[in-house]
């Protein structure tokens, strides 16, 4: 009754008999005791939801980044804000539709098989070959639905953008706005390719990626300022609404990374770590003068 490999299982057929060892159907995973494919009825863990949230945030942040870049404005305007809000609703609706289309269909929740090992993301690489003879193909989505739901979300996000954004750009930013559409038509397929290849690695490393990216992007935001004095950096951050929003966004992203790392298992200690969220920005502001190239002499 046993099956070779880590993922091969037997399907219980309508006549009560078991099939030969093979891949389980989508939404099923084998029971390691009976080797029978059983439906995935578990609920995603907090870490799983944080991972899905990260994948959604990544698309939204890239949309906002390219909208801000192509608009070439140093301050918020009504037209640019309109594009930002449009991108937010595109991503929000795409994520909701992806959840509704996944089992149980029509509900804002999903059934999950869970993730046990990194190999669960790459079952293609673990098809067994008993006695070095014929290979048994058992490729399947062992991490259902964490792998395919991301592809569905990316596809819906791209389709909604192509349906909605052109009309908004025509009213708000006829020239620059269309460049944000072209950018998304490049970066979303790139994200799909990255997820297909290294989705499992991202799943296990995304909390660290968030922390590192938020620190680097925060430093890059301050580095483009012409005046690198403490007073000038503080003044531009506090008085300009665009800079305030950007810095608060970096802090929120940094806090999300800390929550993903700790999962708030110790609420008191992990809550204290959130007090360190402004530290990268404060550190840059008060140390920027020591990195001024004009201060160094051969």
Image: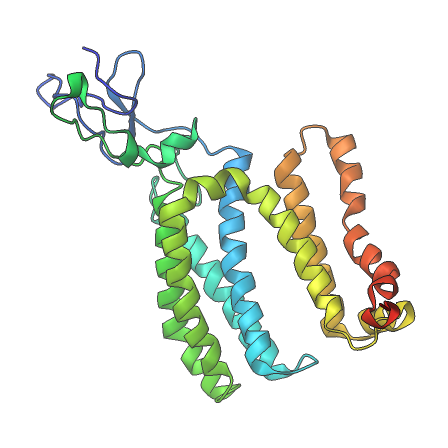
For image coordinates 79% across by 77% down, the residue present is: 226
From the viewer's side, name the closer residue of 159 and 8.
8
Of all residues, the one furthest to the right in this rendering is: 231
Query: Is residue 30 something that shows in the picture?
Result: yes
**In the depicted structure, whether residue 186 falls above or below residue 17:** below
How is the rendered protein coloured? rainbow
**Screen quadrant of the C terminus:** bottom right
**In the depicted structure, whether residue 243 falls above or below residue 43:** below
For image coordinates 46% across by 40% down, the residue present is: 201
Give percent across and percent down for residue 272: 80, 38
Left or right side of 42 for 275: right
**Screen quadrant of the N terminus:** top left
Of all residues, the one furthest to the front in this rendering is: 298
For image coordinates 49% across by 87% down, the residue present is: 171
Query: Is residue 143 something that shows in the picture?
Result: no
Give percent across and percent down for residue 61: 56, 62
From the viewer's side, name the closer residue of 216 and 93.
216
Give percent across and percent down for residue 284: 81, 59
For image coordinates 18% across by 31% down, the residue present is: 137
Give percent across and percent down for residue 279: 81, 51
Left or right side of 143 for 4: left
Q: How many marks?
A: 0
- Residue 131, quarter of the rendered image: top left
């Amino acid at each position: 009754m046993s099956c070779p490999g880590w993922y091969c299982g037997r399907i219980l057929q309508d006549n009560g008999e078991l099939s030969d060892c093979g891949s389980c159907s989508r939404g099923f995973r084998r029971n390691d005791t009976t080797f029978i494919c059983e439906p995935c009825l578990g609920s995603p863990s907090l870490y799983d939801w944080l991972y899905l949230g990260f994948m959604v945030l990544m698309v939204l942040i890239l949309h906002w980044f390219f909208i801000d870049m192509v608009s070439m404005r140093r301050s918020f305007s009504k037209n640019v804000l309109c594009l930002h809000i449009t991108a937010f609703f595109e991503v929000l609706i795409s994520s909701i539709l992806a959840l509704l289309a996944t089992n149980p269909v029509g509900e804002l929740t999903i059934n999950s098989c869970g993730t046990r090992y990194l190999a669960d993301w790459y079952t293609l690489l673990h098809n067994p070959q008993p006695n070095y003879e014929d290979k048994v193909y058992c490729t399947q989505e062992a991490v259902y639905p964490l792998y395919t739901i991301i592809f569905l979300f990316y596809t819906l996000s791209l389709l909604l953008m192509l349906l909605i954004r052109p009309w908004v750009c025509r009213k708000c930013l006829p020239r620059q706005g269309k460049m944000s559409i072209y950018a998304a038509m490049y970066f979303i397929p790139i994200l799909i390719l990255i997820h297909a290849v290294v989705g499992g690695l991202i799943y296990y490393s995304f909390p660290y990626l968030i922390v590192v990216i938020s620190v680097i992007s925060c430093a890059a935001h301050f580095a483009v300022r012409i005046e690198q004095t403490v007073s000038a950096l503080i003044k531009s951050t506090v008085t300009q609404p665009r800079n305030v929003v950007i810095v608060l966004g970096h802090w929120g992203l940094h806090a999300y990374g800390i929550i993903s790392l700790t999962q708030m298992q110790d609420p008191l200690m992990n809550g204290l770590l959130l007090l360190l969220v402004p530290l990268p920005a404060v550190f840059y502001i008060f140390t920027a003068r020591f990195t001024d190239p004009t201060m160094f002499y051969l």
